[in-house]
Image (cartoon, rainbow, N blue to C red):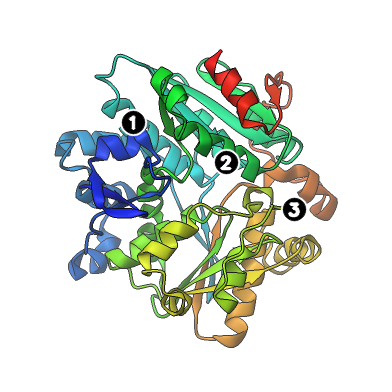
Amino acid sequence: MRFYSTKNKENTVDLKTAVLQSLPPDNGLYMPTSIPALDASFINDLSSKTFQEIAIEISKFYLSEDFDDATIDSLINSAIDFKAPVVSLSDQLQVLELWHGPSLAFKDFGARFMAAVMSKLAADYKKKLTILVATSGDTGGAVAAGFLGVDNVDVVILYPSGKVSPLQEKQLTTLGQNITALEIDGTFDDCQALVKKAFLDKEVNERYMLSSANSINITRLIPQSFYYFEAYKQLENKEEVVFCIPSGNFGNLTAGLLAKRMGLPVSKFIAATNANDVVPEYLENGKYNPRPSVPTISNAMDVGAPSNFRRMEDLYGQIWGDMKSDIVGYAYDDDVTRVAIKEIYDKFDYVMDPHGAVGYLAAKAYQADHPNSNVVILETAHPAKFLPVMEPILGEIYVPERLAELSDRKKVAESLDTDYDTFKAWLMS
């Protein structure tokens, strides 16, 4: 499989270049030159396949030119070794729980797959691979867990000071070894801008072999498509299936679009955002106006200039009407999100995190106009990662042991401002 830049489809690269380079020199994003069309028999036979078997079959379309079947089997079975169950709230409202991995967030799927692929592709390089990653909350924890102790790889995580939850911060800053955390006095967009500038800086790239673990890297999106098939497999009612995706940088939704292009029968995607609503606004009026992000209680979605919007545009040939026919957008503020968390608990006896609660509100709004739809909300993180939000609403909630044990660990992070020259000086030193 070869990959092109969204800014130049004529210039293609192989898997190794796309994965280890992460960002094309022209500052576009890599996309596969072809999206595999799965046989109808594959979709019809999903119920007979394990999650790992589904992932292996899809992976082979992207990886088989670089890895043999045995290597792909081993890679998937080691990276995707946790479940993605569908929980039913009602006959037509389901929740896909994506927080059963090591960092209790959906980004474990992408981070562990990426770590496995990168470590193999970089094995014959003399330089260490340096991963630069910006996080608005959950990406950093998943990447830290996925790459911890991986040979010949160093990870530098940039996160916005005061804008991630305390337990999310501990997941980024307490592991040590090959994981370094930088606390940036700014927003997620500032962190992402620093990372992108570093990738385009010739001097930095002469010293380091840089790669990214953000969803700008195509190996984040490939494994995220797996669980859409796994969710569909588990549904009893497969008519008018709609996926509702709490969205920030829009990698998760883009992965869903890839799954649909591969043949998954999805009627519609719902893009559910908080106050950072640039994509719902675009879907409404056709105008894309990125702007500085604003902080909310659903912090992993605090993105004002989502990178993957460019991939979404690429998939639809920049035709607004075509994208609008597949995706509907909704946005909600913190006040109604808090109300939704309580409503979900009272109505369904289910504890949903602030991001999932935004999804719940969007699902309700969509079903009000489409009563026959069967909506699956992606629950992207365990609610215990957001105790300062959850406990004032619901009181004490269950905290898994692997989160609880972080509270006593010492935070280790270096503070930097948003100036690129300062960040570059830190890198070069």
- 359 vs 296: above or below: below
Q: Earlier in the sequence, mark 3 or mark 1?
A: 1
Q: Amino acid at mark 3?
A: Thr
Query: What percent of the width, then of the height, locates residue 42?
Result: 21, 63
Q: Are marks 3 and 1 in contact (CB under 8 Å)?
A: no
Per the image, label 2 sits on a secondary structure element best described as helix
N-terminal-most mark, 2 or 3: 2
Could you tell me if the residues under marks 2 and 1 are in contact, i.e. CB atoms within 8 Å? Answer: no
SS label for mark 3: loop
> Disc 2 and disc 1: Cα gap in Å?
21 Å
Residue 390 rendering spot, x and y as whole percentages: 77, 50
Return the disc, 2 or 1, that comes first in the chain's sequence. Answer: 1
In this view of the protein, which residue sits in the foreground, 315 or 406? 315
Q: Which one is in front, 59 or 425?
A: 425
Image quadrant occupied by the C terminus: top right
Q: Which residue is mark 1?
A: 118
Q: Which disc, if any, is residue 217?
A: none
**338 lies left or right of 380:** right
Give the amino acid type for the residue marked by disc 1 in the picture. Answer: Met
> For residue 192, which numbered disc appears in the image?
2
**Pointer 3: what residue?**
296
Instruction: Give the SS element for disc 1.
Output: helix
